Amino acid sequence: MHLKPDKGIVDLSRMFNGIIRGWVNYYGRFYKSQLYPVLRHLNRALIHWARRKYKKLARSRRRAKRWLGKLARNCPHLFVHWQMGILPSAG
């Protein structure tokens, strides 16, 4: 994901939502305790993507995390795991 800085957040959402939904449906039923760390890792990958995409976020992991957290709160429908409530912190 972080190797796609040419894509927008909506493009990433379209690319990965089907995969994430499949993980949530399968692991959410059988092994929910291991699902949450994977989804938190996905949030970290999105932060890494944002730092590569936007110059103003490149130097500060905290600023990128806040930016993604605000985006997640304003548009929770973008990613399936955001709809579940697994949001990056907005600081």
Image: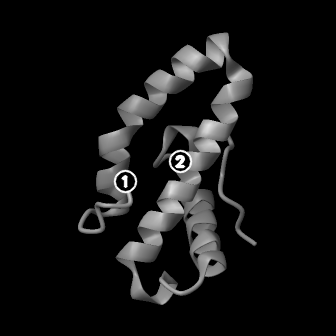
Above or below: residue 8 compared with residue 61: above
Q: Residue at left 59%, top 18%?
A: 27
Q: Residue at left 67%, top 16%?
A: 31
Q: Residue at left 67%, top 39%?
A: 37
Mark 2 residue type? Leu
Residue 5 x, y percent position in the rendering: 30, 68
Q: In which quarter of the image is residue 4?
A: bottom left
Above or below: residue 30 compared with residue 82: above
Reading the image, the residue beneath label 2 is 42
Q: Distance between the residues labelled 1 and 2?
A: 9 Å
> Residue most toward the top?
30
Q: What element carries label 1?
A: loop
Above or below: residue 91 compared with residue 35: below
- Give yes or no for contact between labels 1 and 2 (Cβ–Cβ under 8 Å): yes
Residue 7 x, y percent position in the rendering: 26, 62
Mark 1 residue type? Met
Residue 45 visible in the snapshot: yes
Residue 83 visible in the snapshot: no
Reading the image, the residue beneath label 1 is 1
Above or below: residue 33 compared with residue 10: above
Quadrant occupied by the C terminus: bottom right
Q: Residue at left 64%, top 29%?
A: 35
Crowding near the residue tagged with mark 2, few <14, some 14–19, many ≥20 C-alpha atoms within 10 Å? some
Residue 47 x, y percent position in the rendering: 53, 65
